[in-house]
Amino acid sequence: MPELLIKVVLAYLLGAVLASIVLGRLMGVDVRSTGSGNPGATNALRARGWGFALTVLVLDLGKGVLAVLLIASLPWPWAGGAGTEIAVWLPAACGVAAVVGHVWPLWHGFKGGKGAATLLGCVAAVMPMALVPMLAVWVGGAIATGYVGLFTVMAAVSVAIWAVVAHAGSGLTPEAVFAILMALLMTYTHRSNLLNTWRGTEHQFESFMFWRRLFRRG
C-alpha cells in the first residue's frame, strides 16, 4: 500500500506542472488572461498560435505517458511494496492522479486545465488501442463542427465504452475503471462547454474547420 500511495502522489505532482503556465512565464505571457482563461492547449492556441499550442500539447501529453509508464513502474526496494493484486492497478491509478493534478494543480493554486491532453497521454500508455476510437471521435467531430469541448467529452466517453466492451466478462478491470472515471471527469471539466453548446453560444474553432476554407476557395 505505501508503494501505491507514494507513486500516486508523485504522479499527481507531475500532473500538477502545467506546461502552458510555465512556458508562458518564460515568454512573458499568461495564457490565463487570454480567451477562456483556461491554461490548456486549446487556449494556448488562442494566446500564442499553433507553435506554442503544440508544444503545450506535447508536454501535457508527455506527463501522462510518464506517469503511467515511468512512475508506476519505478522499482520499490523497501518493505510494503504493492502485491500482485494491487500492482495491476498502479498504471491506472497513476494515470488518474496525473489528470487530477492537471485539473487541480498544487503548484498553481489548484486552478488548472481541463485535462484532455494529459488524459490522451495516459490512454496511449494504459490502453493504446483505445486511441483509435478516441482520436476518430475527437478529430472527426472537431473538424466537422468546430466544437472542441463537446467532442473532447465524446472522445472520453468512447474510450470508456471501448474499455467496458473490450474487457466484458472480466469485471471492473483497472482499464475500465480508469476510463469511466476519466469520462466523468472530462464531462465535469467541460461542463461549461456542454452547456454553451446546448444553448448555441459555444465558440467554434474555425482553425479546425479547414474544410470550410477549401469549399470557399472552390
Image: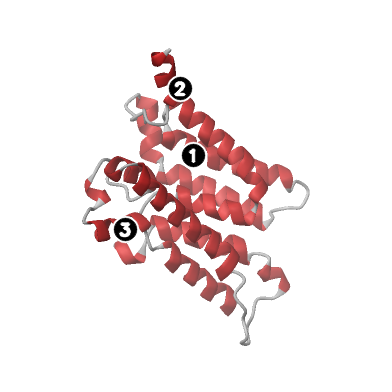
Give the residue at mark 3: 23
Q: Tell me the element at label 2.
A: helix
Please tell me in which quadrant of the rendered image residue 65 appears: bottom right
**Between discs 3 and 2, the one toward the N terminus:** 3
Q: Position of residue 96 (x, y in %)?
A: 52, 58
Mark 1 vs mark 2, CA separation in Å: 23 Å
Rendered residue at 43%/15% (across/down): 215
In the image, what residue occupies the spot 68% across and 65% down?
Answer: 88
- Given the image, on which type of amino acid does mark 2 rest? Trp
Q: Which mark is residue 211?
A: 2
Label 1 belongs to which residue? 153
Cβ atoms at labels 1 and 2 below 8 Å apart: no
**Please, which residue is most extreme toward the front here?**
217
Point out the frontmost of discs 3 and 1: 3
Q: Residues within 10 Å of mark 3 (few under 14, many from 20)?
A: some
Number of other residues with Cα within 10 Å of mark 1, as a class: few under 14, some 14 to 19, many 20 or more: many
What amino acid type is highlighted by mark number 1?
A: Val
User: Is residue 216 toward the left or the right of residue 34 in the image?
Assistant: right
**Horizontal and vertical percent for residue 81?**
64, 80
Task: Give the vertical position of 76 relative to 43 (above or below).
Answer: below
Q: Secondary structure at mark 3?
A: helix
Screen quadrant of the C terminus? top left
